[in-house]
Amino acid sequence: MSGDTRREELPALLAREWDLLIIGGGITGAGILLEAARRGLAALLVEQKDFAWGTSSRSSKLVHGGLRYLKQGRLGMTFESVHERQALLRDAAGLVEPQGFAFGDYLGRKPGRRQFMLGLALYDWMAGRRTRRLLSADEFAMLAPHVARAGLQGGMLYQDAKTDDARLVLRVLQEARQHGGMAVNYLGVASLLRTQDTVDGALLHDAIGHRDYRVRARLVISATGAWADGLRGQVGGLPRLRPLRGSHLLLPAWRLPLAQAVSLMHPQDGRPVFAYPWEGVTLVGTTDVDHGAGLDAEAAITRGEFDYLLAALRWQFPALDLVENDVIATFSGVRPVVASGALDPSREAREHALWVEQGLLTVAGGKLTTFRAIALQALRMAAPLLPHWRADLRKRPVFTAVAPLTGSAMQLDFDQRLRLLGRHGAQAQAVCDAAQDGELAMIPGTQTVWAQLRWGARMECVEHLDDLLLRRTRLGLQLAGGALAILPGVRAICQHELGWSDARWEEEQARYLALWRGHYSVPAP
């Protein structure tokens, strides 16, 4: 359904009676929409900007059990995360992929081999499978070429997983729509509505059509992540969140070649830093600092964070002599961490929390990996507030199984077909069928085919060019200058699909490039 058609249908859609109004279009809100819709609730999700615009397109892209939480004694959190990771690997193949992690054992570096292997043994036990193994110094160097050899005694290898976080959100929303859920982007909450001091709806503002709508629902759920305290403040809730910023670097794979992810402890403060192959580039992260800037603007890496991450790379890979010009792009996200009072941001727990205040159910905190478990917990808390509703809230497969691709898709190799099925689910065949001549070829330097641009523009609610280049695809992160060199090719495919005039395209391109330079490029010294 095109963006224009969706906007025309908004008045009728928003006039309907809803069981749930879910505010927030990140992974938590999307997960709640899916689990609610597949259990018969009339559920509407609204997002003030684009789907996955916030934290859920700016995470470290890891689907992991939280190995470091074992050290903090959070065994239950790790156990749940490991099992959700395994479910995603099983049900979202091609979107969630295994990723090996290698940790160097250097003389005098902590944690030592014995302690690390004990933690990995518990980690593997929770998953019900063994992935850990010891590496010799030569084996470690083969997995991580150019690694520092001074003091290297060997290493440890274990397995987690990685994903394209924005595409995971879009796949969850797609599945929710198949079950009758509805989701609208660029539809924000101006204020909450109440009846006798109980929240029962919201006044919504359409940022595209510039209209306001009053929407009523039996229950309103806030899944707005780092923005949750703003809505809670409307019902008298005191601030509970500590916004923490995590920033990342992206380098060409040829400049920092890795066969596995490499985990290291930063020489400055001992914090964990990682580098791993992702979407045809090498991703490096992450920082963990208090985000003092406002939440309305896009987060951006600071010069201090940039230098911090680059220093870690130069220390771990001294032979490469990496410099700032090697960095293709940067990105930053703000994590919705429930404050515990810890002085060190890295010591804050990543556990989620739920509160009901004057009928508003807020879900905050949590991890990308555990979105399904968080959604089900939210619905268990919602059940007493929806007395007409009864449902089985046991876990179901994350996604419905989809048929193999046929026809023109067979010109793609197995991995490419699996990748399309993982990212587009039941729509993957239509993505291939919509491709014109040459559009099933991969865009150089990426693992994205041109047809995904056409499909995103046609069917995935794109309202701005950055929706297409930063979230429907990740071309703005994978290619130099925000994919500047291929913008003419993007225009040739997408301008007609979007129904944009020449003037509108030029306006959107200028807007996108200014956004990229201000928030996704190398920061000024």
Image (cartoon, rainbow, N blue to C red):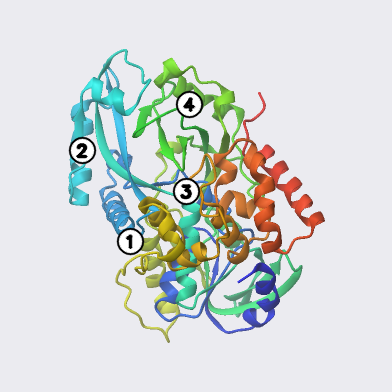
**Residue type beneath disc 2:** Arg
Query: Closer to the N terminus: mark 3 or mark 1?
Result: 1
Percent across and percent down for residue 222 are 53, 64
Residue furthest out toward the right: 503
Neighbourhood count class around disc 3 (C-alpha, 10 Å): few under 14, some 14–19, many 20 upward:
many
Quadrant holding the N terminus? bottom right
Residue ID at (44%, 60%): 409
Residue 78, which numbered label? Answer: none
Looking at the image, do the residues carrying marks 4 and 1 touch, with CB atoms under 8 Å apart?
Answer: no
Front residue of this view, candidates 383 and 513 = 513
Amino acid, disc 3: Val
Q: Residues within 10 Å of mark 4 (few under 14, many from 20)?
A: some
Label 2: which residue? 132
Instruction: State the residue in front, 214 or 144.
Output: 144
Q: Is residue 125 among what the camera can see? A: yes
Residue 324 percent location from the top left of the image:
57, 24
Q: Percent position (x, y) of residue 158?
A: 26, 38
Numbered disc 3: secondary structure: strand
Closer to the chain start, of discs 2 and 3, is 2
Q: CA distance from mark 4 to mark 3?
A: 34 Å
* Callouts 2 and 3 close, C-beta under 8 Å: no
Query: CB under 8 Å between callouts 3 and 1?
Result: no
**Residue receiving disc 4:** 255
Label ID, residue 337: 3
Q: Tag 2: Cα neighbours inside 10 Å, few (<14), some, or many (≥20)?
A: some
Q: Nearer the viewer, residue 195 or 449?
A: 449
Among the two numbered marks 4 and 3 on one chain, the one whose residue lies closer to the N terminus: 4
